[in-house]
Amino acid sequence: RTQGLGRTLRDLSACPIEEKETKVSNEAEETRKAARMPARKTSSKGKGTKRKSATGPPPTESKTSTKRFKVDCSAQLMDILDFERPILSGKVYEGPAEETVFPKPVETLGWEFLLENVQLSSGDFETKLDKMIKTTDLIGEMEEDLREQFEDSLLTNHKLATKKLLALQHSAPPSSLKASAAETPSKSPYSLRKRKSKANGSASKAVSNGKVKAKSKKKGGETELDSEIIYEFGGPVGAFMIMAWSHCMMYYLWLSVEKHNGGLFVPSGLDLWHIYNECTPSLRIAGIYLVFIALQYVLGRWLPGLIMEGLPIPSENYTVLKYNCNGFSAWWVTLIIVGALEYFQIFSIATLADNYGQLMTVMVIFGDFMALSVYVSGFLLKKTIRMTGNHVYDFFMGSYLNPRIGPLDLKLWAEVRVSWFTLYLLTLSCWVKNYEQVGGDLSKIHPGLYVMVIAHWLYTNACVKGEECIVTTWDIFYEKWGWMLIFWNFAGVPIVYTWNSFYILKIQPDLPARCGIYLTICLLITYYIWDTTNSQKNRFRMQMHKTFKPRPWYVFPQLPWGTLKDPIAIKTKRGTRLLVSGWYGLSKTRKIHYLMDILFALEWGLAAGCQNFLPYFYLIFFTSFIMHRGIRDNERCERKYGKDWERYCALVPYMLIPGVW
């Protein structure tokens, strides 16, 4: 019912408003109501932004044919009414005057009736309202004063909406109601994505090399936040310690599973010899990895895909970058190539499991090399942003926001293709190796490897099928592409996240088959919530920016409730909206998708049994990382939205765990 509340006005373009009839009927209505209710206030202060005047320019007669206009979404109608959509709890995000509030028992009914019949003239609206009141049992059971309040509120809201819409007809062209930056210049204040140029206040664009430049007069605000310099992760000392620890930790995990039966140990000089002797990469292993990187570059650069626009970047004059989202095609081409190589015995994927240590070293070296190259290129190309002057910290966080080679965005490419494709192929190599060890008997493969290969396939497939959603995320829009992201894209994610697969292959921990089935069921439930939550959030952003494009049927699985048809959001003073419906409204949790990521980590740990502590290292590491990231995001939103963020937190009060925190 929450989703049906304030349903979209799909075909208002076919609904004329006759100005003369509306003017006469409004005057009659004012005379009829004068004795029953006080005069309407022209302004009211609510919890959000200040209400505009309820009185628009008087309608004038037109000798031309009846004008028609279009309202693209009900959120725009709420803009016209000066307050956001109500929710079932009875709260209103921007306070209307008293005479526009419906009695709580019939609040939903009132809004649905108004939004369905707002196109009618006052006379027709009143006739239909009288009929509805007489035929609705719920209203008939109400007390007389509440029934009169309900009727008066509907008539007042309809009158207000009619005046506002008529005023817009006379003051702006129909295109001004369309929420798109690609529209013609508009004078209407109700365009959801209007960005003004310094010259004439009209929206303008210039397209070049996959970029859309949107000129803007904005000062401060997002520009200040985008350029704000803040020491995080403990500053330079903390950044250095994280970089050093990340390298050591990866080799420690390798030593544990190879030389210490998967348990904790105190390193010795002999362990260093094992690393030198067994992790020094051969030219063959280095060549395999570099061929894989080259293949992903070619696929990412030239395969056709869905062209999507990202969010305007304040530090680059609100440039809107274009992204070729062809990850799904690249994913299946990669799987077909790997399958063909295995089938024709040209190359066995099990080779990766046999040379895990060497491959890890290649990834570490390549990740560090890429991080250094991108850091230097930021200076050479004069693309540095949010620099502190401390090279250790700046190298860790990055100097370059959106490095590209032609139309290929390297940050999106590495995050979606390199990290997750490598992750799945490493887990698949462990499964294939175990298959070879048990003589091809599928029933003897460790249940934990089934859980891991299903989990990593689902996760990787979700990233590529929803790649268009990633272009509006924090990583792409705000985070610079520094060592923190680059190293973990190329080495950290593929190695640390697949360590449990390697552990299961080598140690073969006890795990009954039924436990593997239970874990798979829990995994699928977690996946559904995680996938649909991320889809709801990012598709809502795209809906507001008019960039949402449904994917075709073969980009699967497209899960139910992945797109909110009638999202409910609060409007901020910045003009943006914060989503409070879907999983966020149901769970009252702002980072419910982070919680699902943590549950993934727990399920991966349980797939490796309970014999050792290290299979749960990733759970502890990832939980601490994601909690820190959630806190960073919360602090940034507090600075960005101010009191609007307080209103949002009152509606979605928990950050990570529903009912707890």
Image (cartoon, rainbow, N blue to C red):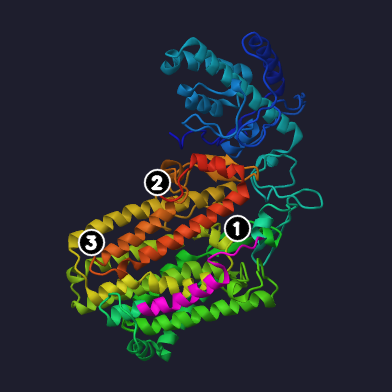
Q: Quadrant of residue 370?
A: bottom right
State the CA–CA distance, disc 3 to disc 2.
Answer: 30 Å
Where does the image place residue 158, in percent across and percent down from the top left? 61, 23
Asked whether the residues under the numbered discs 2 and 1 touch, taking CB atoms below 8 Å apart as contact, a structural biologist would say no
Q: Which residue is mark 3?
A: 516
Q: Which residues are magenta?
A: 228-252
Q: In the picture provided, is 557 more to the left or to the right than 567?
A: left
Q: Which residue is mark 2?
A: 660
Residue depicted at 65% across the width and 25% down the height: 160
Examine the rendered structure and indicate whether residue 323 appears above or below residue 521.
Answer: below
Residue 482 visible, this orientation: no
The amino acid type of the residue labelled 2 equals: Val
Nearer-the-camera pick, 394 or 335:
394
Where does the image place residue 589, in percent across and percent down from the top left? 44, 46
Q: In the picture provided, is 343 more to the left or to the right than 220?
A: left
Mark 2 or 1, closer to the camera: 2
Mark 3 or 1, closer to the camera: 3
Residue depicted at 69% across the width and 27% down the height: 43
Residue depicted at 45% across the width and 71% down the height: 419
Q: Quadrant of residue 440?
A: bottom left
Residue depicted at 59% across the width and 71% down the height: 398
Where does the image place residue 390, in percent across and percent down from the top left? 63, 73
The amino acid type of the residue labelled 1 equals: Glu
Q: Which residue is mark 1?
A: 309
Q: Quadrant of the N terminus?
A: top left
Is disc 1 placed on a helix, strand or loop?
Answer: strand
Is disc 2 placed on a helix, strand or loop?
Answer: loop
State the CA–CA distance, disc 3 to disc 1.
Answer: 41 Å
Q: Earlier in the sequence, mark 3 or mark 2?
A: 3
Examine the rendered structure and indicate whether residue 199 appears above or below residue 20.
Answer: below
